[in-house]
């Protein structure tokens, strides 16, 4: 008996040793796989951020391009020294982009204005093929580009006046905001330009070099730069990754619009900052399985398993509670378990029991809005819908006691027999607010704060569709300031700007809540009047005309008005032409009158 027990004991020890050796080998394999996944994630993250910044830079350029006042100044070759100083300051104050550059170029590729330099008047056609291409194609372009000052992200937008090409607006952003965002994920960045372009870099903006390679981001850590210099920076110019010095080092190739490499985005992330929860859980799971097998041999081992399982459950719950995302366990009907982070948002409750006493499901708080997860997605419950569409990105809008939150959400099945689901909610409030801010900038006139020409076209198309669907009346008022050029010529553009601002405020205060007020040109404005007949619209226009004439703020001015009512089946181009003709007749008849078209 003792020999058998001893043999079993020795066999258990040998089996355990072999089993542990197998687990170590498997864990090492998983570590390599995890590092590969981490490297791909960093690749994807920086690629997504660069693309997002390129699109944001294009949005800024398109917003500025709607300024008819700018177009007129380009045509007249009259750009002030500090033309966009206040706009650049607003970008620095209200967005993540702290160092936006703006350049204005005329139709002959002469630089009329640079926000970062006093130099102007030089012709760029021989050194900036990208500008020549835009002047030729009349299409928007964006890319990562090497210039005289820096390696940057550029958005180039052609400018038109009455459909005639008059120049180009170029908005230039840098990599610093991307490196700052990556820092939040414990990723250090060094953005380097290929030394092939060193001769082109006449005025290096950061003045930082590693050997002959220019460093394009100010916040590149000294430790990372020293490490690249010591080990040879070219060693890291690839799209793979390396594990060195306790770090994962990932390189991302930066290409221009012709797909030619112009630099590299090198990222450093310490291995100890990468979550190993899945590896620890793997070891825990398979060690527990081995223990269960051994526990089946003896009661004493079974007793050990009992206590081990109790510790394991607490360990697992502690891991979930340490997560920064909301984690829910759901059985399709109600919540079974949650982590503590949920009570940061549902602060009225302290425990899951308190929550369930008043609510059956978190879906009770969903906001019904297109583009967001609802309690029922067609004929499918929301949890089942998430599980069936795991490859898609899902967002959730939640109203928690009067405060709106946005989350990205994913779900997976954890127990098939009992239909248990794990649901993870990630707070994306910051991203959603930033997205809305950019959308607002793209449809807002920078000077007056009302809608711009782009906003007018969007709203007009929406109102035409509503008028067609619900058979209600829709009218349009177009007006401009009489002899506004004389105001600018006599009193200067700053006074002209004050006139535009003050009279915009006056007109806005006189409009109905549902009316849409937009600036579509230098001194041209549109008012969309939903549910207003031509008679009502004429009365509104006449009221505005008399109020403007009697106001005399800044300077006494008058305005001429054209008024039309939408005809069923008429598109935006036809109604625009009719209201423009009505305004033209008001001008012909002596100005400061309302003409109905």
Image (cartoon, rainbow, N blue to C red):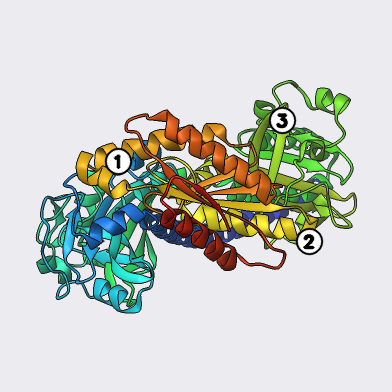
Q: Nearer the viewer, residue 224 or 363?
A: 363
Above-or-below relation of 164 to 224: below
**Label 3 secondary element:** strand
**Circle 1 crowding by C-alpha within 10 Å: few under 14, some 14–19, many from 20:** many
Which quadrant: the C terminus? bottom right
First-in-chain label (1 vs 2): 2
Q: Which residue is mark 1?
A: 496
Q: Which residue is mark 2?
A: 388
Residue at the outermost front position: 589
What separation in Å lies between label 3 and label 1 (alpha carbons)? 47 Å
Q: Is residue 515 left or right of residue 245?
A: right
**Circle 2 crowding by C-alpha within 10 Å: few under 14, some 14–19, many from 20:** few
Q: Nearer the viewer, mark 3 or mark 2?
A: 3
Q: Is residue 398 left or right of residue 251?
A: right
Say which mark, if any, is on residue 535: none
Q: Nearer the viewer, residue 382 or 520?
A: 520
Q: Are marks 3 and 1 in contact (CB under 8 Å)?
A: no
Q: Nearer the viewer, mark 1 or mark 2?
A: 1
Q: Nearer the viewer, residue 306 or 7?
A: 306
First-in-chain label (3 vs 2): 2
Q: Is residue 77 left or right of residue 401?
A: left
- Viewer can see residue 43: yes
Q: Are marks 1 and 2 in contact (CB under 8 Å)?
A: no
Q: Tell me where residue 318 sits by quadrant.
A: top right
Residue 32, given in percent of the width and then of the height, sits at: 49, 61
Q: Are marks 3 and 2 in contact (CB under 8 Å)?
A: no
Q: Which residue is mark 3?
A: 400
- Residue at x 55% of width, y 41% of height: 542
**Circle 3 crowding by C-alpha within 10 Å: few under 14, some 14–19, many from 20:** some
Above-or-below relation of 242 to 438: below
């Amino acid at each position: 008996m003792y020999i058998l027990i001893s043999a079993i004991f020795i066999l258990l020890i040998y089996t355990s040793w072999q089993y542990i050796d197998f687990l170590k080998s498997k864990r090492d394999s998983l570590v390599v796989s995890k590092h590969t996944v981490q490297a791909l994630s960093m690749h994807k993250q920086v690629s997504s951020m660069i693309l997002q910044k390129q699109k944001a830079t294009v949005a800024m350029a398109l917003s500025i391009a709607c300024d008819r006042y700018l177009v007129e100044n380009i045509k007249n070759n009259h750009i002030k020294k500090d033309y966009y100083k206040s706009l650049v300051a607003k970008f620095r104050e209200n967005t993540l982009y702290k160092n936006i550059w703006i350049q204005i170029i005329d139709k002959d590729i002469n630089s009329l204005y640079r926000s970062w330099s006093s130099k102007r008047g030089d012709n760029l056609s021989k050194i900036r093929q990208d500008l020549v291409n835009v002047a030729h194609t009349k299409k928007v372009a964006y890319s990562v580009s090497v210039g005289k000052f820096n390696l940057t992200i550029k958005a180039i937008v052609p400018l038109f006046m009455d459909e005639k090409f008059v120049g180009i607006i170029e908005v230039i952003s840098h990599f610093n905001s991307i490196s700052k965002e990556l820092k939040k994920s414990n990723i250090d960045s060094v953005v380097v330009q290929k030394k092939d372009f060193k001769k082109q870099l006449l005025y290096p903006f950061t003045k930082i070099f590693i050997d002959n390679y220019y460093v394009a981001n100010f916040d590149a850590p000294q430790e990372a730069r020293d490490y690249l210099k010591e080990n040879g920076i070219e060693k890291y110019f690839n799209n793979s990754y390396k594990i060195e010095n306790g770090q994962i080092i990932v390189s991302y190739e930066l290409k221009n619009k012709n797909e030619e490499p112009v630099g590299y985005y090198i990222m450093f992330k310490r291995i100890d900052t990468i979550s190993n929860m899945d590896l620890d859980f793997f070891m825990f799971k398979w060690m527990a399985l081995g223990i269960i097998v051994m526990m089946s041999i003896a009661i004493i081992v079974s007793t050990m398993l009992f206590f081990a399982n109790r510790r394991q459950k607490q360990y697992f719950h502690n891991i979930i509670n340490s997560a920064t995302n909301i984690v829910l366990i759901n059985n399709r009907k109600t919540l079974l378990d949650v982590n503590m982070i949920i009570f940061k948002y549902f602060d009225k409750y302290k425990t899951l029991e308190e929550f369930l006493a008043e609510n059956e499901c978190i879906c009770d708080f969903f906001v019904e809005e297109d583009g967001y997860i609802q309690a029922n997605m067609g004929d499918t419950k929301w949890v089942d819908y998430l599980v069936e569409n795991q490859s898609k990105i899902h967002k959730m809008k939640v109203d928690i006691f009067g405060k709106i939150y946005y989350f990205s959400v994913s779900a997976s099945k954890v127990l098939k027999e009992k239909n248990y689901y794990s649901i993870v909610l990630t707070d994306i409030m910051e991203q959603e607010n930033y997205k809305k801010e950019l959308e607002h900038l793209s449809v807002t006139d920078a000077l007056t704060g009302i809608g711009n020409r782009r906003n007018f076209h969007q709203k007009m198309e929406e109102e035409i569709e509503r008028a067609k669907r619900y058979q209600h009346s829709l009218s349009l008022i177009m007006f401009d300031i009489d002899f506004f050029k004389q105001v600018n010529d006599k009193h200067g553009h700053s006074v002209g700007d004050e006139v535009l601002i003050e009279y915009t405020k006056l007109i806005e205060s006189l409009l109905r809540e549902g009316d849409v007020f937009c600036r579509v040109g230098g001194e041209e404005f549109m008012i969309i009047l939903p549910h207003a007949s031509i008679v009502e619209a004429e009365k509104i226009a006449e009221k505005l005309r008399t109020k403007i004439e009697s106001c005399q703020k800044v300077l006494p001015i008058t305005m001429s008005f054209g008024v039309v009512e939408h005809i069923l089946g008429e598109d935006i181009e036809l109604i625009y032409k009719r209201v423009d003709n009505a305004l033209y007749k008001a001008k012909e008849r002596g100005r400061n009158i309302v003409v109905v078209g």
